[in-house]
Image (cartoon, rainbow, N blue to C red):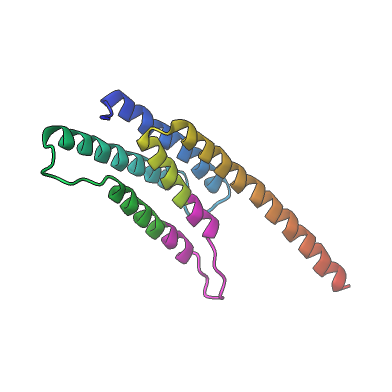
């Protein structure tokens, strides 16, 4: 299956849109990685995936058995590269006090890569679902963490009285 130019643009555009929503949530919360990075990761993931699939389809059509092509290797490379970006988000937040920070953002960057790959493969509904669930997780989990911290602070205050 070769993706034509308009389909390519549509899939890439949806990857950027879905990732932008997640990046916006991170930016609103002043997290170290935000809208631009999320959008670029999804765009790159979608484009690498579609270009690889197009290349594999066109090569197989031209040369029957002379070349062995495995498009899943590109997806493996995308996952590794995004893991590297996510690790950078985590490590850049270490404050030297033994606390690890940025795990949520690192995981979100990794998820955005999955959204980009899904869009690149044409799984647009699935990509939208993943984006919606990820946004819900980031929003609800943050709210729950803030409530838990408020409760902990109140308990500490009452114990100190």
**In the rendered structure, which segment of residues is drawn in magenta?**
86-108
Quadrant where the N terminus sits is top left
The answer to whether 155 appears left or right of 11 in the picture is right
Looking at this rendering, what residue extends furthest in the bottom direction? 97
Residue occupying the far top of the picture: 6
Residue 140 location, x and y as percent? 66, 46
Please tell me whether residue 88 belongs to the stretch shown in magenta. yes
Q: Does 143 sit left or right of 101 as displayed?
A: right
Q: Residue at x 37, y 27 (%)?
A: 10
User: Is residue 105 rendered magenta in the image?
Assistant: yes
For residue 71, which quarter of the picture?
A: top left
Residue 69 is situated, as x and y percent measured from the top left of the image, at: 21, 45
Q: In this view, does 118 lie to the left or right of 99?
A: left
Dividing the picture into quarters, in which one does residue 60 lie? top left
Q: Is residue 6 above or below residue 68?
A: above
Residue drawn at 68 percent across, 56 percent down: 145
Of residue 47 and residue 49, the one placed in the foreground of this image is: 49
- Asked if residue 62 is positioned above or below residue 97 in the image, the reply reads above
Decide which of 156, 8 is in the foreground and name it: 8
Place of residue 96 in the rendered image (x, y in percent of width and height, measured from the top left): 52, 75
Give the mark count. Answer: 0
Seen at 33% across and 26% down, the residue is 7
Q: Relative to 129, is 121 on the left or the right?
A: left
């Amino acid at each position: 299956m070769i993706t034509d130019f308009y389909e390519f643009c549509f899939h890439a555009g949806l990857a950027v849109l879905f990732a932008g929503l997640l990046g916006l949530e991170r930016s609103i919360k002043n997290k170290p990685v935000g809208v631009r990075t999320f959008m670029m990761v999804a765009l790159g993931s979608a484009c690498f995936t579609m270009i690889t699939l197009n290349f594999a389809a066109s090569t197989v059509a031209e040369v029957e058995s002379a070349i062995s092509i495995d498009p899943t290797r590109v997806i493996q490379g995308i996952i590794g590269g995004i893991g590297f970006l996510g690790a950078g988000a985590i490590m850049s937040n270490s404050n030297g006090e033994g606390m690890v920070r940025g795990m949520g953002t690192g995981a979100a960057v990794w998820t955005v890569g999955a959204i980009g790959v899904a869009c690149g493969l044409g799984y647009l509904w699935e990509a939208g679902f993943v984006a919606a669930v990820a946004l819900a997780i980031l929003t609800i989990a943050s709210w729950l963490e803030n409530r838990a911290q408020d409760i902990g602070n109140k308990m500490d205050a009452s114990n100190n009285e």
